Image: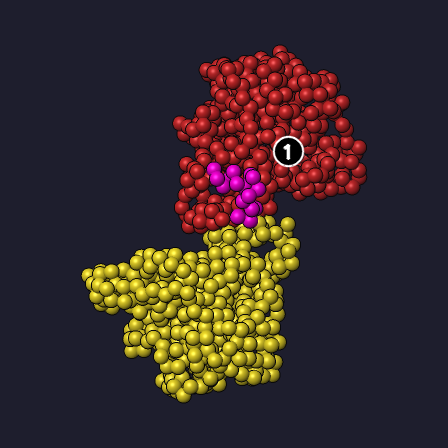
Chain colours: A red, B yellow
Amino acid sequence: MFVVPLIERKRDGGALSPEEWSACIAEYTAGRLPDYQMAALLMAVVLRGLERQELAALTDAMLASGQRLSFESWTAARIDKHSTGGVGDKVSLVLAPLVAACGVAVPMMSGRGLGHTGGTLDKLEAIPGFRTGLSLAEAKAQVMKLGCALIGQTPEIAPADRRLYALRDVTGTVEAIPLIAASIMSKKLAEGLTGLVLDVKVGSGAFLPPVAQGLELAQTMIALGGDRGCPTVALLTAMDRPLGRACGNALETEEAILALRGEGPPDLMEVTYALGVEMLLAAGIETSTKKARKKLEAALSSGLAAEKFEQVIEAQGGNPKVVEDPSVLPQAEAVEVFLAPETGVVTRVDPRTIGRAVVALGGGRQQVDDVIDPTVGFVITVKPGDRVLEGEPIASVFAKDAGGVKLGFEALGQAIVIGDRLREKPLPLISHRVTTDGIEDLTRSPAGAV
Amino acid sequence: MFVVPLIERKRDGGALSPEEWSACIAEYTAGRLPDYQMAALLMAVVLRGLERQELAALTDAMLASGQRLSFESWTAARIDKHSTGGVGDKVSLVLAPLVAACGVAVPMMSGRGLGHTGGTLDKLEAIPGFRTGLSLAEAKAQVMKLGCALIGQTPEIAPADRRLYALRDVTGTVEAIPLIAASIMSKKLAEGLTGLVLDVKVGSGAFLPPVAQGLELAQTMIALGGDRGCPTVALLTAMDRPLGRACGNALETEEAILALRGEGPPDLMEVTYALGVEMLLAAGIETSTKKARKKLEAALSSGLAAEKFEQVIEAQGGNPKVVEDPSVLPQAEAVEVFLAPETGVVTRVDPRTIGRAVVALGGGRQQVDDVIDPTVGFVITVKPGDRVLEGEPIASVFAKDAGGVKLGFEALGQAIVIGDRLREKPLPLISHRVTTDGIEDLTRSPAGAV
């Protein structure tokens, strides 16, 4: 009952002390503070916010609820990238081996699909045999040996976040910047990193669409990371349309492999390189954007990045042949081409409609314990601004049967809007760079002209 | 899961439809909507408020969760009084038989002590044998026969309120005007009334101390009652000091009996008469304040009111001799007189300190299933503004042993502040009258000069 006055204080706009946050999270994790009291406290936080000190204390308490990767005296730079989630976002699968191939250790802990967005773990598990459930000890050994491990949030990492996340999901307390920041950072800080790069999605397909909210989330996480000895930098990237062409687990894994072989779509490559540059700079391996970019391009064109992915796949029990021959990925039963219904300009490719359709096709979960079908999804070859002719192929549906194809066609018909001209400018692919020094608007500098 | 979008809408400042409120309350009462979701929704309501239509729908849904007294074709005026709770507030025990003696039916449903405030049921149960747990059928028969029944909230009445109240108590969601209004009115509207008079307490000992909040609560409940065919009027009365002299269950019952015999303290009598006048006016038995007051005074001085209380006590299994001889009430083991520690003016008699001390002495509950000791409490014979001489008796402590007396003395020493002059004017005993026509400031009219 110690918590009632704390709930009342937060409700009335006051702050909890670090000790009070620590006690709340410890008691909640131990099952002694009931869900209904935590739900009331979380709703008060959503509406009243958290002071910087409170957010730090909450994050520390969530971090302290579990174990963390410790590399002790191993001084190699360890950098991870985290995306706030989007549709078609397979960047991690390209970026992790690419950066590891440049000599940076990447202990990457990813999540599963959530709502309309896909999850890196689900994409990796499309590879036959791939095991994401490594223990912390296994992950550490692999990072020290190969420079990269691609794992899921183990039960030992931030268990408080696991319980809180499940509660937030059913109590309307997901969309709150401090709670999102604490959830992400409590997991990332458990990875034993020396630096972190964030990909904060903005636009209609992001969890927090407005650019202003994306900037606030970025700044909140950067402050949290910096204060806790993990220098953090963020890029804001566009999620008003899917990233790349493929949406769906195996399809995205295939696109990632093509990207590692130098055949990735331009938007996917630009975002991957931009984040990779930040990771190399954070690692201190390069000191200029230009040199970092060249190093990444060389690692890709030389085949080193693809080779690194093969090593990681093999180490984690997957079939490494997939990199040479993506057809070892599971294939959809029914594939049909979608034709442009009219001549004109593509004004919109709505990411939420596409993301939800992937889930509806069986490629995501409606309930926590749903088994997903890795083969389903879309490949959409047009972007907003492209001119199309009636009858021209602009997308494909991958489904398990004719009913799925029908559903997919309906979704494409709704998501891809064709008009006489582009009414609204698509968001810049990479719009802002956020560091502890402030916000850099990349659309006003040559670097952003992509 | 239908409720998550509703929680989100309320969180974002939107409104729920009547059907949505009805579904939430029905599912919650049926145990299908879990406490944690209701807690999040309640916190959002505390911080975002309820629109008038929403409050009406919530109240109706809570009312509809249970049964209600129905007097069918019985056309007699049925008026109840409800107080928002205070310290030393034994008005109900005097008022119900007094008004019933004037020919108004009073089906009064009361509560137990809550926090630092006492409860009418606990006071009644100090009378040996008194049974407050009548069924609705028993209560109805007694009201039709005697014109008065004094009962507790039966399990059939607004069960949703019962569950919601318990949840609010442990989730920091008590202090919200719409939730307080819905809780009170869902129970009162179940009494089958033709009118309702509210005693809204203001000042430091009230649940909502500021006058502005008291006025808002009064207006909210008046609108709710009026819209649902139960004309409602409210008086704002002072709770910056205890009402009357006695605080503690048997002590207050004794003071109420003395009041019915014409020996009540002036402040208790004024509040009782003022509320009684409103009840007679609401019943249409008198048409002017003056005549109504005279009728009440006559019912008291003639002994009819005391006789009515005897009848009610007898009908509900209590020992009716208590009215003639209050010493049949249980008596405290240890009684000690408290002397003024210095000469000066009483500047404060803090009601919360006194109320909490009654609970600490065993006269209230710290936990729901605590058994209370009806004998303990205080009689405080001074009011703010009174001059006192050092060593003069100003109060008595009633306890079960010497330890209790010590505790009581400490509380009195803290609660009764003596200074050189009154620094802050006590609140007017009866400050405002609130009706659907608006707010009448009684301190600017002769009626308020009490």
User: What kind of element bears circle 1?
Assistant: loop
What residue sits 66% from the left and 16% below the top?
A311
Residue pointed to by mark 1: A112
Q: Amino acid at mark 1?
A: Arg
Residue B327 visible in the displayed image: yes
Q: Position of residue B337 (x, y in %)?
A: 31, 65
| Residue A29, magenta (yes or no) | yes
Lateral position of residue A6 relative to residue A93, left or right: left
Q: Position of residue A269 (x, y in %)?
A: 59, 23
Who is closer to the viewer here, A237 or B157?
B157
What residue sits 58% from the left and 15% below the top?
A144
- In the picture, the quarter occupied by the C terminus of chain B is bottom left
Q: Position of residue B119 (x, y in %)?
A: 47, 66
| Image: magenta residue range | A22-37
Residue B92 visible in the displayed image: no
Q: Position of residue A108 (x, y in %)?
A: 58, 24
What residue sits 58% from the left and 61% below the top?
B160
| Residue B438, magenta (yes or no) | no
**The quadrant where residue A391 appears:** top right
Instruction: Classify B190 as above or below B15.
Output: below
Who is closer to the viewer here, B79 or A352?
B79
Figure label count: 1
Q: Main secondary structure of the magenta part?
A: helix
Near mark 1 (Cα within 10 A), the count class, few <14, some 14-19 or many ≥20, is: some
What residue sits 27% from the left and 60% below the top?
B417
Q: Chain of mark 1?
A: A
Instruction: Classify B414 as above or below A383.
Output: below
Who is closer to the viewer here, B392 or B137?
B392
